[in-house]
Amino acid sequence: MKEQTHGVRLNDEQRIDWLRLFRSQNVGPRTFRALINHYGGARAALEALPGLARRGGGGTTPKIYSREDAEREIAAARKLGVTFAAIGEPEYPNRLQVIDDAPPLIALRGHLPALAMPAVAIVGSRNAWAAGIKITQQLAHGLSEAGFVTVSGLARGIDAAAHRASLETGTIAALAGGQDRVYPREHEELLRAILPAGVALTEMPLGWEPRARDFPRRNRLISGLSLGVIIVEAAKRSGSLITARLALEQGREVFAVPGSPLDPRAEGTNSLLKQGATPVTEAADIVAVLQPIMGLELPAREPEPKDDPIQDAEPASDERARIVGLLNPVPVSIDDLIRLSKTSPRVVRTVLLELEIAGRLERHGGGLVSLV
Amino acid sequence: MKEQTHGVRLNDEQRIDWLRLFRSQNVGPRTFRALINHYGGARAALEALPGLARRGGGGTTPKIYSREDAEREIAAARKLGVTFAAIGEPEYPNRLQVIDDAPPLIALRGHLPALAMPAVAIVGSRNAWAAGIKITQQLAHGLSEAGFVTVSGLARGIDAAAHRASLETGTIAALAGGQDRVYPREHEELLRAILPAGVALTEMPLGWEPRARDFPRRNRLISGLSLGVIIVEAAKRSGSLITARLALEQGREVFAVPGSPLDPRAEGTNSLLKQGATPVTEAADIVAVLQPIMGLELPAREPEPKDDPIQDAEPASDERARIVGLLNPVPVSIDDLIRLSKTSPRVVRTVLLELEIAGRLERHGGGLVSLV
């Protein structure tokens, strides 16, 4: 990304453009990146959106986040003590920015230096037993002593226990809603207690009430912020198992606390152990695995093909038809599309952007796309 | 071994000689094998024992098991329904005979065809909780249904639960004492219940009261009889962990049942999981691992160097001194002794036998020996 220079800040104008682009309809983290790469910057991408949508054939024009809305959100955030960090800026957590679908902007609140510390996520069931709470406390205390911050989702049960046990040394709460829409409500006080030494972060706008589907999306931030994820208690179909899967996809370590085969709260963790997760009974087990990899370079994200940031010539309509004809709801790789459509990479990427902005295309990890 | 031909039976005279040699002082399973290899048969080895002991420099002559004692043991055994199987005979369990220190003779009682079935050991703590007992029952039932016999040590707790849950389909009890010295006494009735479909076996003589050190020795039979060993519950320093280690040394699978980090009965099993044991919550987990290897050839034991079974020329005393000078309580390999002493393999092996029979040398796995 031309505007994304590591350790360099966006100026105020650029930040407004980034926020507008990210908050516009049909622009997820992967689309955002594709747009910036294609157009060289957020401003140019914003200007291209209506044309892309029209050519992509969406029935209605996608809603573009207005300059006024963006300025209002930034001002309201400032009042709450919330700042926005763009991917590549110094405040943006290092580990998070290497995941495939890192949010281009995150809203941060609290003691931001905590984001620079090595982090381990602790997650588990909401209806945790006393035993699970106690193990969580022991693990969190041990990790704090070893210099780690904890990461979790502010949920009831294991999440809350993990945050509470590391309030003094630092803990990071990744939210599924806006910074002013804490869920569950009863944890508003816990969140306030987190902020002096820790951080609350989210990619969602102020005022956003979290819906069910926002939690799995949020879970990628929990694992993405962390060197590893510990699953303390998890029943068979638990949201924590989603976090474990995301952690694996992101190349993070997965730890599971063993439990009795007779305990339904351990079905998920025992099943993770069978799949190769590292068994954990005390913090030392985690430190032993993570300390050797703490100093290592972050895995480099695959280099993106960069287009010349010049205004597009529109793809010819037969080119567009050829590419659309190759797409269906089964994800295919962009490389295959380029090869099979016998058109230039630039044309393929332009057509994909059109379809995305029109709400007709989904971008997956690993360079795969599918029709919605 | 000349006398050890697979699938061929010893005659009565040979069986008496084998029993005498195996029951003679300072003749363990490894020494037995070395003697048979060296002298070509048990009779010749028995005749060589006094000379070997004298030249080996033991203070007293080791006690040789008399012909009368052997005949009396065989007759008494027959009355109890106990037969002796020699390594290589059809009744001798296939898997057991490939372990490094397989007993040359085992005393068997019960339904001997059970020894030909695929076997899985289930072991664990003696002071088991209801939960451990229940898991043991579930595993044993599942394994029975899948066509496995269980193997265990007739101890209180997990062992007894494993036997009890598989009485009908077959279970094997490996004893640390003689066939007429069941330990603990309260399990005499359980043992009787095992015999109609299962087997009790031991390498110890009739009348032998098991001592503490006989139990770890017995544990190698539990793992040696089995494709894999399941540890259900085990505290930190549990005898079951010895069985797990022996199983690993013998190339058998090690399974451990996970438990809560807060449960001291799971410390041993969780620690095995951390070392790479396969986590198990149901019988299907074991079947999935073992079924693919059930049809495989047994691992071949390293071929032994066979000496010509001719009567020894005594080693020259300077040769003997050179070899003894290279030995100390730290195990060294016989190959190194041959190389460093610059004497023939035959002379080195003769001197080692002398020292063994004199009670001055111990033979370990992997061709290692040390002074006692």
Image (cartoon, coloured by chain):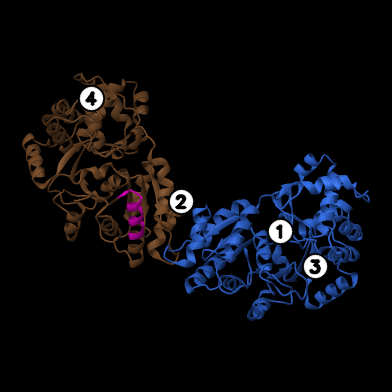
Chain colours: A brown, B blue
**Helix, strand or loop under label 1:** helix
Any mark on residue B136, and which? Answer: none
Q: Residue at x 19, y 44 (%)?
A: A108
Looking at the picture, tell me which residue is in the foreground, A367 or B369. B369
Of residue B289 and residue A296, the one placed in the foreground of this image is A296
Please indicate whether residue B168 sits to the left or right of residue B5 in the image: left
Question: Which residue, given by chain and number where applicable, does mark 2 sit on?
Answer: A275
Residue B84 is marked as 3
What stretch of residues is rendered in magenta?
A137-149
Residue A99 at x, y = what percent? Answer: 31, 38
Q: Mark 1 or mark 3: which comes first in sequence?
A: 3
Type of the residue with mark 2: Gln
Question: Residue tagged by mark 1?
Answer: B96
Residue A106's quadrant in the figure?
A: top left
- Amino acid of disc 1: Leu
Q: Are marks 2 and 1 on the same chain?
A: no
Mark 3: few, some, or many residues within 10 Å (few <14, many ≥20)? many
Q: Is residue B6 visible?
A: no
Q: What chain is tagged by disc 2?
A: A
Give the percent coordinates (x, y) of residue A127: 30, 64
Residue denoted by label 4: A2
Give the letter of the chain under mark 3. Answer: B
Which element carries disc 2, helix, strand or loop?
loop
Q: Decide whether residue A145 is among the magenta residues.
A: yes
